[in-house]
């Protein structure tokens, strides 16, 4: 959220993801909100704001985005047991085990679905009635989580 608010955690005195920064630290204009307020269409795909209460359970909608933020359907399986462990029976949840899309429930990975949505948006925008209108497309990937 620091990049999008242009505020460092030590400036806001907000060091956790358990509070909505607009309520606790200040009602700052975000980067996408600035673009939106200046005539741009703003689109969010994937993990742009930190999810949950820190973005008001809405990815800072309606302030930052022109439409509903896109979250990939396979994100629902984020903690699905898909990892095998040597010497153990069954599958286990693990945030860092290597998996391929065909091993995932739904046959895909959230980041692949986000990529496809971003490509679809760009393709549709280039040929639709919006063509020529300014836009900001923000795409956030979950992994690698750096």
Image (spheres, rainbow, N blue to C red):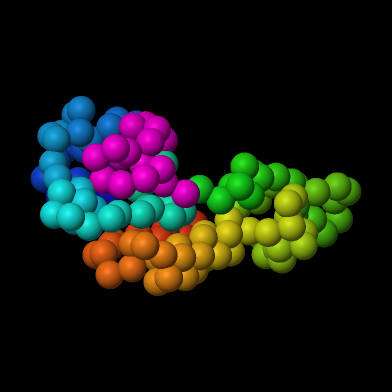
Screen quadrant of the C terminus:
bottom left
Q: Along the line of sight, which residue is nearer the eye, 2 or 123?
A: 123
Q: In this orientation, does residue 142 appear?
A: yes
* Left or right side of 60 for 128: right
Tell me which residue sits at (86%, 47%) in the image: 90
For the magenta stretch, what is the residue range?
Answer: 52-70
Camera-nearest residue between 69 and 86? 69
Q: Is residue 120 above or below residue 52?
A: below
Where's residue 63, x and y in %? Answer: 24, 40
Q: Position of residue 77 (x, y in %)?
A: 66, 45
For residue 130, which quarter of the picture? bottom left
Q: Residue at x 46, y 65 (%)?
A: 124
Q: Is residue 86 above or below residue 77?
A: below
Q: Is residue 88 left or right of residue 77?
A: right
- On screen, residue 30 above or below 109: above
Q: Is residue 54 magenta?
A: yes
For the point 62% across and 42% down, the residue is: 76
- x and y, in percent, of residue 69 in the image: 41, 46
Identify the residue at horizontal 74%, vertical 57% (top origin).
Answer: 107
Q: Is residue 102 above or below residue 11?
A: below
- Return the residue nearer the eye: 48 or 135: 135
């Amino acid at each position: 959220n620091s990049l999008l608010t242009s505020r460092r955690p030590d400036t806001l005195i907000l060091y956790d993801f358990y509070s909505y920064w607009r309520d606790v630290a200040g009602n700052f204009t975000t980067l996408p909100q600035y673009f939106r307020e200046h005539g741009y269409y703003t689109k969010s795909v994937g993990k742009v704001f930190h999810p949950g209460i820190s973005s008001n359970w809405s990815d800072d909608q309606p302030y930052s985005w022109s439409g509903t933020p896109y979250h990939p359907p396979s994100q629902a399986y984020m903690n699905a047991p898909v990892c095998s462990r040597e010497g153990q029976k069954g599958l286990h949840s693990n945030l860092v085990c290597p998996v391929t899309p065909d091993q995932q429930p739904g046959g895909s990975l959230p980041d692949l679905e986000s990529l496809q949505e971003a490509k679809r948006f760009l393709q549709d925008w280039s040929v639709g009635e919006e063509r020529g209108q300014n836009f900001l497309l923000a795409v956030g990937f979950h992994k690698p989580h750096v």
